[in-house]
Image: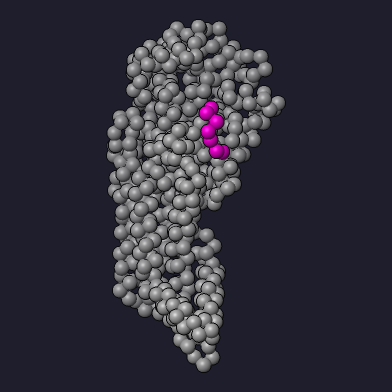
Amino acid sequence: MKMVNVYNTRTRSKEEFVPIEGNNVRMYVCGPTVYDYPHIGNARSFAVFDTIRRYLEYKGYRVVYITNFTDIDDKMINRSKEDGIEVSELAAKFITEYLTIAKQLNLIPATINPRATEHMDDIIEMVELIIKNGYGYDVDGDVYFNVPSFETYGGLSRIPMDDLSSRARVEVDEKKKDPRDFILWKAEKPGEPSWESPWGKGRPGWHAECSVMGKHYLGFPFDIHGGGQDLIFPHHENEIAQSAAAYGIETPVKYWLHNGFLTIDSDKMSKSEKNFSTAREVLDNYDHQAVRLYLVTGQYRQPLDYNDKAMKQAIQSLERIKNAADTIRGRISILEKIGSRESDADRKLAEASKKAREDFEKEMDDDFNTPGALAEIFTLVREINTLTKDVGGAAVLREALAVMIELVGILGVNLADEAQTGEGAGQAAKALKGIVDFLLELREGARKSKDFAKADQIRDRLGELGIEIADTKDGPTWKMS
């Protein structure tokens, strides 16, 4: 197996990907806080890590993939009050929305989608261990993590301690021993959901849930933790501190992967800035597969700009891929009727298919370089468009189609639809016949009106596409050359 190299945020370098346990990959990706419709920037993270998962599975790894739902936090509580509904009802509404979007983006379902509220006992146990081990303290039912007690804090984000202090002072809390300390458990407030704990009724701080769910489902250490770059600090930094302090493990995660922001005119897309489009709005206005393709057109660690021009380019790219697949299917259908005859084009297409797979893997092995991988797919598309009309063997065409379907499938685009079946191939052949017959009718009309230049032009263009025209006393006939 050729090795995959991944960029590890923790070390700020590309590293050879070696799972902790054989071919088993344990992967946790921070999921949505289900208080609102996810925006298209959230959808980029969904698509990026689904693509990474798909490629690892393609390489032969067995992937356990966990994505959580944050179904209790300040945003959830505030939104539920605005809408006049229970937090649980709000969560159910937007979890349903997420699952709809996931299906439309062709995401492979997670192995498990745990919810924060399902793991209160685990969270409470972790907080107890943090206090017991000397890293946390309780003030009137609020429990804090004592950042200065954890010497390696800041190792993931690499933010100097002075800068951490400045950031922490943005939200002053007089209960803290140090402004950098962060909340583990929040004391109950009137009208808010709460759970019994050793410190009184309350609820967890946001950072706690991912530490306990990662441990619960994957164990420590696990292989990959993913999320957006905005989660590096404080969320993932705090996860490391919590996990290490509670469970005595120095490195709970081997590889930290973070996707870049989706931008609008180079500005980060953000709900707080109100410069965003929801995933629902985008998916309602564009072909779902084109949206998925767009989301992986940029290398995942780099920013990706969202605009109408970019979406139109994605639509055109998708059409090029689909047209190439239809070209192959139509040719296969014709060869099934007239029989096979190998030609030099067969060898060239077979070589192009093999090279496309090899070069695609080379790009994806380099930190999941999807732009480079797409370029290799379009190289194969170009070869298909050039060679297919001269290919005489159906087996070579089927292999080229299978390669294209598999490679674009890794990027989340599904070409293996009903058109791949015998019925679909028959429909493609029927469509081809209708188009050619229509062009021949136009040619006959040109000949009758003595526009022989137009008639010859139609005949010559069909010839370039591998369609031979024969004029008989009963009218023109055609066949694939």
Can you tell which quarter of the image residue 75 is in?
A: top right
Q: Is residue 91 above or below residue 194?
A: below
Rendered location of residue 124, percent (x, y): 53, 19
Q: Is residue 337 left or right of residue 38?
A: left
Residue 465 falls left or right of residue 173:
left
Please tell me which residue lies in front, 453 or 252: 453
- Magenta residues span 271-278
For this orientation, the residue located farthest to the bottom is: 473
User: Who's the residue at 54% across and 71% down the image?
Assistant: 431
**Which residue occupies the extreme front position in the image?**
450
> Which image quarter holds the C terminus?
bottom left
Which secondary structure is most common in the magenta stretch? loop
Indicate whether residue 215 is drawn in magenta: no
Residue 55 coordinates in the image, percent (x, y): 39, 47
Say above or below: 454 vs 369.
below
Seen at 66% across and 14% down, the residue is 190
x and y percentages locating residue 441 in the rendered image: 55, 80
Camera sees residue 401: yes
Q: Is residue 276 magenta?
A: yes
The single residue placed furthest to the right in the displayed view is 84
Looking at the image, which residue is at 44% across and 77% down? 457
In this rendering, does residue 336 appear at all? no
Front residue of this view, candidates 316 and 456: 456
Whether residue 422 sits left or right of residue 231 in the image: it is right
Q: Horizontal and vertical percent for residue 364? A: 34, 47
What residue is at 45 percent from the left and 7 percent from the top? 177
Q: Is residue 78 depicted above or below 200 in this figure?
A: below
Occupied quadrant, residue 349: bottom left
